[in-house]
Image: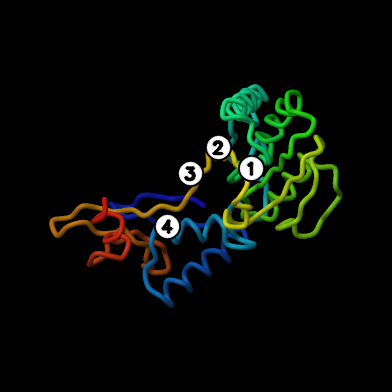
């Protein structure tokens, strides 16, 4: 997918792959049915739409993907986080049971490096579990292959396996599925930069939201004529 600036407007040209054509057809149909969509809605659809979303069906990391994150470059980063993790846990009194919750774990490399360090220092009787918040079924299996020896092909959501270090690990599509009564440490490495956002512009008439509409079949940015719900909620409150 390429994004090109045309005289102050943005035009989105999708590549010829059938998956991206299906995604564009879906977005066109959605806009035609309900009207212009927010940038947040657009980002959510192109990133997480089942079977067509960016993260949903392939490994986007590393040399075969589109970008790389620090845990994939060297294990030193994750091991240092593991040392910090253990130190902070000890500093607050080593509460048990303990759970590590990671948002958007990618390939599972960061947690793998953390567990390598933590397993060397932990008490033998430690009650410890890992919980991954992951929306991509494909990446769930990539993470499972990295961390576990189980040969399971079916849906992993809600399923508890065991890592090669012996710790139970469970996959969840939402944070609300994670047990609430257990002391938790949270990880979110390069996670928030992929979250959907709303986009606004200050005009002589006040703040207006930038939306995505259709023109001659192409996607383009437009300004809302009036304040939107997001404008009233996010701009007025702030």
Residue sitting at 80 percent across and 42 percent down? 148
Q: Nearer the viewer, mark 1 or mark 2?
A: 2
| Whether label 1 touches label 2, CB < 8 Å | yes
Left or right relative to 145: residue 33: left
Q: Are marks 2 and 3 in contact (CB under 8 Å)?
A: no
Q: What's the CA distance linking mark 3 and mark 4?
A: 13 Å
Measured as percent of width and height from the top left, residue 209 is found at 29, 59
The residue that mark 1 highlights is 106
Q: Earlier in the sequence, mark 1 or mark 2?
A: 1
Specify whether residue 18 is in view: no
| Residue 233, quarter of the rendered image | bottom left
Q: Which of the 4 image quarters holds residue 127?
A: top right
Mark 3 or 4 closer to N-term? 4
Q: Is residue 108 left or right of residue 152?
A: left
Q: Nearer the viewer, mark 4 or mark 2?
A: 2
Please state the total of marks drawn on the protein image.
4
SS of the residue at dot 1? loop
Contact (CB < 8 A) between labels 1 and 4?
Answer: no
* Location of mark 3 (residue): 192
- The CA span between labels 2 and 3 is 8 Å
Whole-percent x and y of residue 94? Answer: 64, 31
Q: Nearer the viewer, residue 12 or 149?
A: 149
Q: Residues within 10 Å of mark 2 (few under 14, many from 20)?
A: some
Residue 82 to residue 18: above or below: above
The 10 Å Cα crowd at callout 1, few under 14, some 14 to 19, many 20 or more, is many
Q: Quadrant of residue 67?
A: top right
Rendered image: mark on residue 40:
4
């Amino acid at each position: 997918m390429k994004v090109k600036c045309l005289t102050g407007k943005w035009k989105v040209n999708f590549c010829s792959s059938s998956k991206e054509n299906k995604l564009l057809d879906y977005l066109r149909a959605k806009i035609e049915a309900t009207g212009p969509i927010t940038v947040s809605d657009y980002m959510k659809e192109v990133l997480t739409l089942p079977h067509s979303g960016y993260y949903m069906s392939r490994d986007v990391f590393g040399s075969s993907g589109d970008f790389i994150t620090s845990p994939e470059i060297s294990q030193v980063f994750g091991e240092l986080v593991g040392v910090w993790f253990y130190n902070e846990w000890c500093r607050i009194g080593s509460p048990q049971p303990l759970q590590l919750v990671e948002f958007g774990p990618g390939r599972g490399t960061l947690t793998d490096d953390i567990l390598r360090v933590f397993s060397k220092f932990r008490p033998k009787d430690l009650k410890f579990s890992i919980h991954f918040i992951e929306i991509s079924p494909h990446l769930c299996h990539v993470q499972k292959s990295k961390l576990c020896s189980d040969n399971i092909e079916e849906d992993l959501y809600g399923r508890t396996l065991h890592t090669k270090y012996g710790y139970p690990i469970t996959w969840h599509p939402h944070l609300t599925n994670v047990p609430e009564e257990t002391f938790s440490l949270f990880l979110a490495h390069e996670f928030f930069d992929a979250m959907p956002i709303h986009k606004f512009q200050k005009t002589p008439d006040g703040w207006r939201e930038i939306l995505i509409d259709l023109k001659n079949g192409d996607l383009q940015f437009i300004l809302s004529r009036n304040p939107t719900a997001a404008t009233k909620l996010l701009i007025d409150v702030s």
